[in-house]
Image (tube, rainbow, N blue to C red):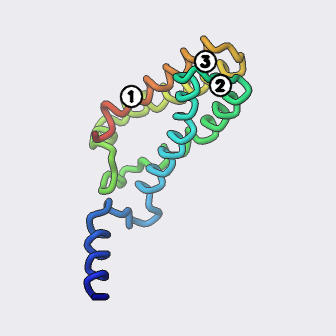
Amino acid sequence: MPLFFLLTATLLTACGEVEDTRPGQPVKHRQVAFKEIVKTFEPMGVMLRKETYKADKFLPMAEALLAKRDGPWDYFGADTNYPPTKATAEVWKQPEEFEKNKKAFIAATDALLVAAQSKDKAQVEKAYDTVHEACKTCHKQFKER
């Protein structure tokens, strides 16, 4: 019976996602960094969609987003297009376009912070939507679905 459980556990582990075993684990680091961005960004959207906007709670979230926004970019090295990446080969085939999308995201997060500092909900909603669109635009071209 213990052998059965050991085999079952081994098979279940094999069904999981591919692990990044390369030195420095760049793919894993950028995936973790993107997840941190999402964990910071999504509650902002929930607050806006559920009409529970509170300027004093939103501002620290916008500041946290700025603190995390640079996390993934350094991990897109020339030799990082391997499983478990979810990036498309276009990242490396079109580096100028990828950089343009990254800069649009950075500018949009800067504008979101300014809007959050204004505490004006209309400005915040517009700036949030711009960040969201920057994410969607980049994902459409540079992330596997």
Instruction: Decide which of 80, 83 is in the foreground and name it.
Output: 83
Instruction: Decide which of 126, 103 is in the foreground and name it.
Output: 126
Picture quadrant where residue 136 is located: top left
Judge whether 129 appears above or below 102 on screen. above
Find the distance from the CA under tag 3 to the CA under tag 1. 18 Å
Nearer the N terminus, badge 3 or badge 1?
3
Question: Is the residue under label 2 in contact with that under label 3 (CB below 8 Å)?
Answer: no
Find the distance from the CA under tag 3 to the CA under tag 2. 8 Å
Q: Mark 3 points at which residue?
A: 124
The amino acid type of the residue labelled 1 equals Lys
Judge whether 91 appears above or below 119 on screen. below
Q: Mark 2 points at which residue?
A: 113
Q: Outermost residue toward the front?
A: 1
Dot 2, how many residues are within 10 Å of its Cα: few (below 14), some (14-19), or many (20+)? Answer: many
Query: Which residue is rendered at x = 50% and y = 25% of the image?
Result: 131
**Horizontal relation, residue 107 to residue 25: left or right:** right
Instruction: Decide which of 114, 91 is in the foreground and name it.
Output: 114
Instruction: State the mark number for residue 136.
Output: 1
**Horizontal relation, residue 144 to residue 61: left or right:** left
Instruction: Decide which of 104, 115 is in the foreground and name it.
Output: 115
Query: Which residue is rendered at x = 43% and y = 30% of the image?
Result: 135
The amino acid type of the residue labelled 2 equals Leu
Q: Nearer the viewer, mark 3 or mark 2?
A: 3
Spot occupied by residue 64 in the image (x, y as percentages of width and height)? 65, 38
Spot occupied by residue 125 in the image (x, y as percentages of width and height)? 56, 17
The amino acid type of the residue labelled 3 equals Val
